Image (cartoon, rainbow, N blue to C red):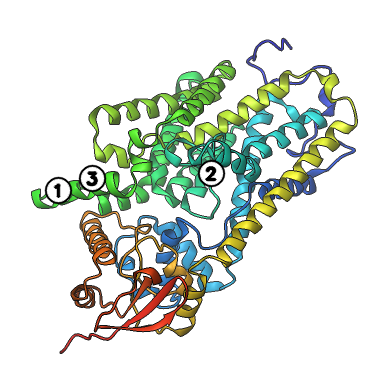
Amino acid sequence: MNNSSITNQPLKPKNLSENSEGSDFFRIDPKGLRGPLGSILLILLFVLAYAQAPLFTSNQNQYFLHGMARAGIGSLAQDWLVSTLDPTPVFSFLIYLIFSITHWKEIFYLLYAALMGVYLFSLLGILEHIFHLRASRGRFLLVVAALTALHSAALRFLLARGLGPSWIFLFDGGLAGQRLLGTVFQPSAFGVFLLLSIYLFLKGCRVWAVLSAILAATVHPTYLLSAGLLTAGYLLVVGLQERRWKQAAGLAALALVAVAPTVWYVYGSFAQAAQPEAAQMAAEARRILVEFRIPHHAQIKTWFDLSSVIKLGLVAAALVVIRKQRALFTVLLTVTLASAALTLAQWFTQDNTLALLFPWRPSALLVPLATTLLTGALAARLPQRWFAPGWVPAACLGTLLLLAVAGVLYSANDFRQKATAPDRAMLDWVAQNSSDEDIYLVPVKMENFRLETLRPVYVDFMSIPYAGPDVMTWYGRMLSTDRFFTEQSCQEVIDYVYDGNVTHMVIESARSFNCQYLTPLYEDDHYIVYNVNYRIKD
């Protein structure tokens, strides 16, 4: 092999015979780890090194709500947000199903670990198809160790401390803070099936490749664009390159049928209404989402920075590296160019509808794949003599173990911070001393109150609806609550009783105030819980 370029055939390290390859995907070496046990060990080390945040963190406070309410957990079914349209009904059904079977919440850590396993399996499978790295134990372990390091909590910690929050997921996150893997189990994590889709396509499993991409979009509809672009790339390969027009037509028909329920739900539930008044409300709702709630995801001027340039550079470099791998290059180039064109269109038009389509979201797929391809290409070019010493595999495994330990310590610190957070004592008290009839007004940034106490709240900033009228209601509640905590008008307490049946309020101790309608029930150094003693007269 000429190591100076990538050929049309899968790359293999020099001086290695065909007989050194095993039939098992994760086979490392006859004298090393074997088959399923090797797979499980590598995935476990990757999962530990990546680390998970404790339940319930960040977006889980929104995406778990509908399912937990449907399962009858606490009194969450009384929450106003539960009455709004669910943006991720399939994921909510999964949450409902799990809580209906068991209240053992640790199962979500295991489910997320399984998705991480799909992620690693898919990346290594794509690499194996192109570079045949598993023929050398040392070379393969070096790639696994490198990928684990680039995804590790240890690296995220260093990047956050050294460069800032926008750099944390530099090698495995897409643009605008969107990524396949985060640190919690949520709908976006099912984007790993987009990676699996690519691997299946390269292996010739075309039907399963399309269905895998559709699965990601079914669980999280914001992947509809990514799944559609992937499928378009597949059709170009099958139709134009392979001249299999009937197969291409069949795949297209399969994709349309499989995605139809999700498209129907999204369009029917969240599309702009035809009436002028409704259309105006929908436009205002989109503006609120783009400019007020999620500018970090929806406004290019907000999220585009130097880290974005580096990520785009990784994608461009990966396309150069695989330019002679016709199938994979065609698919990735299709996704990249279409995503770039739509992103530029949004930049020039400043259209909020297009912004909420997140045309840059495919970068969440492209960036980690680019990082993986570049890592594999570099490893394939290294001389085989570098891997001859027996200590190389041991050093790679040692590195993996160290990264896993660092990840465990990182997670342990997250759990410790949550257990000692200023609101911990107050949340525990509410959970133990509240009733099913209680509805709380809380500070708008107290995103975890619902799921920690299993009690409904009037509004918070994190959890949002997406349909036009619901967004307007949410925004009005947000402005009202923010004004109340700033001005602390006793008269507004009555308004919350009428508008949201509020029975209790949580106020920071430093902001406590006297109001004839409020009776303190609990107080610590950080928060006071009040009972609202005003009641609506029949």
Whole-percent x, y for residue 476 in the image: 21, 60
Number of marks present in the image shown: 3
Q: Position of residue 138 (x, y in %)?
A: 81, 30
**Relative height, residue 224 to residue 454 (above, below):** above
**In this rendering, does residue 8 appear at all?**
yes
Q: Which residue is mark 1?
A: 279
The residue at the point 55 percent across, 17 percent down is 320
* Quadrant in which residue 248 is drawn: top left
Q: Position of residue 313 (x, y in %)?
A: 51, 23
Residue type of the residue flagged with mark 1: Ala
Residue type, label 2: Phe
Q: In which quadrant will I find the C terminus? A: bottom left
Who is closer to the viewer here, 151 or 200? Answer: 151
For the residue pair 340 and 247, the one nearer the viewer reads as: 340
Q: Residue at x 79, y 49 (%)?
A: 37
Q: Is residue 339 above or below residue 427?
A: above
Of the numbered discs 1 and 3, the one sitting upstream in the chain is 1
Q: How far apart in space, not on screen, are marks 1 and 3 (Cα)?
A: 12 Å
Sequence-first disc among 2 and 3: 2
Task: Tell me the residue that label 2 is attached to.
Answer: 193
Callout 3 amino acid: Arg
Q: Would you name the residue on which mark 3 appears?
A: 287
Asked which secondary structure carries label 1, the reply is: helix
Q: Nearer the viewer, mark 2 or mark 1?
A: 1
Q: Is residue 244 visible?
A: no
